[in-house]
Image (cartoon, rainbow, N blue to C red):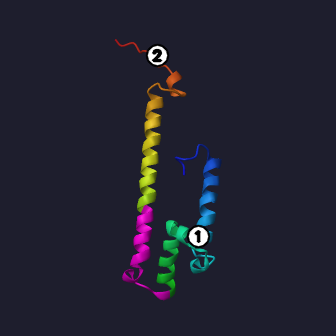
Amino acid sequence: MSTLSKTQLEAMQYAFVIMLPSVLLSGFMFPRTEMPLPIYLVTFVIPVTYFIEILRGVILRGAELRDLIGPTIGLLVCSAAINGVSVIEVTKAQKYLRQSAKGGCGFFSQMTIAPTRRG
């Protein structure tokens, strides 16, 4: 979120926009099976859905990893996708910062360094 937002307030707003649907659609508050089909399909994109399935399996049923292989793979796929997107965004931000530091634009391009005398 920090690479997408320009201010701390924007980052907090993004967090609320992401967290509220995650909690409501993950199956934590309402059963996913009772949701309309389009919304039910959206729940498979939310990583919290898989985490809650794993948590319920371990705490309530005492399930082992082989019993939770489906949600574990789902969580790993979501994690890989989120990490991939964040690496791309950080790379873009780094390229922009390097370009602006070389004299492209911004505060650092207006700064000059005085020559030093030696000897």
Q: Residue at x 38, y 80 (%)?
A: 65
Residue 71 included in the magenta stretch of the image:
yes
* Crowdedness near tag 1: few (<14), some (14–19) or many (≥20) residues, C-alpha within 10 Å: few
Nearer-the-camera pick, 52 or 109? 52
Secondary structure under tag 1 reads helix
Tell me the mark number nearer the camera, choosing from 1 and 2. 1
Q: In this view, does 106 lie above or below 69?
A: above
Q: Which of marks 1 and 2 is nearer the N terminus?
A: 1
| Image position, residue 60 (x, y; %) | 51, 86
What numbered label is drawn on residue 39?
A: 1
Which residue type carries mark 1? Ile
3D distance between C-alphas at marks 1 and 2 = 62 Å
| Image position, residue 20 (x, y; %) | 63, 64
Q: Which residue is drawn at 42% across and 44% down?
A: 91
Residue 4 included in the magenta stretch of the image:
no
Secondary structure under tag 2 reads loop
Q: Residue at x 62, y 47 (%)?
A: 8
Nearer-the-camera pick, 60 or 119? 60
Residue to which mark 2 is pinned: 114
Which residue type carries mark 2? Ala
In terms of image quadrants, where is residue 118? Answer: top left
Which segment did they paint magenta? 61-79
Q: Main secondary structure of the magenta part?
A: helix
Q: Is residue 115 above or below residue 1?
A: above
Nearer-the-camera pick, 21 or 33? 33
